[in-house]
Image (spheres, helix red, strand yellow):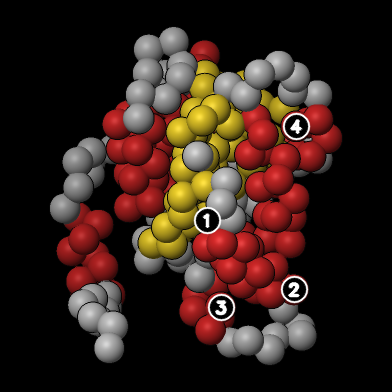
């Protein structure tokens, strides 16, 4: 019998968790959240506070100098990553939208991290193809179209240094990964498939964590 030791987070306990972290009173984050909420239902694509805090924490602890992100939206994850970079560190952001990333640019400036970030607009796989040289990324974060995750993984992995860390967001799909037959939901099918692939892939060490909507943490062997 497997040891089942976990706690269910209701709204009250989730709020308690969010309130017990460093940097709680962050005016830039508060303003970015308010600006993103004006987009209506699209705002759900913004990562939550606790996930942003985890990104900054990991990037800082790993002393990341070269990071890459696929899927920038209004800039919450890129802001978190850029804040955690080691001195002289750089973040490359790949996104399709000029409209949403225009919001991100404004908040990068406000936070004083714009000089650490390069944004390239266009299909991420095309942008990745033109990146040449030895594998040199220390950290990668993927939060984009779910059916593209596997292709992003295969394109990113050769560009990661040994020991480099990749994070994939939304890997639990609000619990829908437990529903094996969802013909109307290609995103969930793609995530289920990638979760299984990462578990068995000898090129990485992998760990699925129940943070926010689920993140898969991978370290390149």
Q: Are marks 1 and 2 in contact (CB under 8 Å)?
A: no
Instruction: Give the SS element for disc 1.
Output: strand
Q: Which numbered disc covers residue 186?
A: 2
Question: Callout 4: few (<14), some (14-19), or many (20+) C-alpha neighbours within 10 Å?
Answer: some
Q: Which numbered disc covers residue 104?
A: none
For the question of whether residue 103 can be seen, the reply is no
**Reading the chain from its start, which is encountered first: label 4 or label 3?**
4
The one nearer the camera, 186 or 218, is: 218
Please tell me which residue is depicted at 44% across the width and 10% down the height of the picture: 88
Instruction: Give the SS element for disc 3.
Output: helix
Residue that carries the numbered disc 4 in the rendered image:
128
Q: Which numbered disc covers residue 177?
A: 3
Question: Callout 1: few (<14), some (14-19), or many (20+) C-alpha neighbours within 10 Å?
Answer: many
The one nearer the camera, 52 or 171, is: 171
How far is mark 4 from mark 2, CA to CA?
Answer: 24 Å
Residue that carries the numbered disc 1 in the rendered image:
169
How far is mark 4 from mark 3, CA to CA?
Answer: 28 Å
Q: Position of residue 53 (x, y in %)?
A: 32, 44
Please tell me which residue is depicted at 52% across the width and 56% down the height of the picture: 169
Question: In the picture shown, does residue 175 fall above or below 123?
Answer: below
Q: Position of residue 110 (x, y in %)?
A: 44, 24
């Amino acid at each position: 019998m497997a040891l089942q030791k976990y706690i269910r987070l209701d709204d009250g306990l989730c709020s308690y968790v969010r309130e017990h972290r460093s940097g709680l009173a962050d005016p830039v984050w508060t303003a970015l959240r308010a600006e993103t909420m004006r987009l209506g239902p699209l705002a759900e694509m913004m990562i939550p506070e606790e996930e942003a805090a985890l990104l900054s924490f990991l990037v800082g602890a790993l002393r990341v100098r070269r990071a890459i992100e696929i899927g920038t939206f209004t800039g919450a994850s890129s802001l978190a990553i850029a804040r955690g970079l080691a001195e002289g560190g750089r973040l490359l952001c790949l996104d399709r939208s000029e409209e949403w990333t225009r919001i991100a640019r404004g908040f990068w400036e406000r936070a004083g991290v714009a000089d650490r970030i390069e944004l390239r607009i266009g299909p991420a796989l095309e942008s990745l193809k033109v990146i040449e040289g030895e594998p040199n990324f220390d950290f990668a974060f993927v939060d984009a179209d779910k059916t593209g995750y596997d292709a992003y993984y295969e394109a990113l992995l050769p560009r990661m240094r040994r020991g480099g860390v990749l994070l994939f967001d939304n890997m639990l799909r609000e619990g829908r990964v437990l529903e094996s037959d969802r013909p109307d939901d290609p995103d969930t099918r793609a995530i289920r498939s990638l979760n299984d692939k990462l578990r068995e892939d000898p090129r990485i060490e992998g760990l699925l964590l129940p943070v926010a909507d689920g993140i898969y943490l991978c370290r390149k062997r």
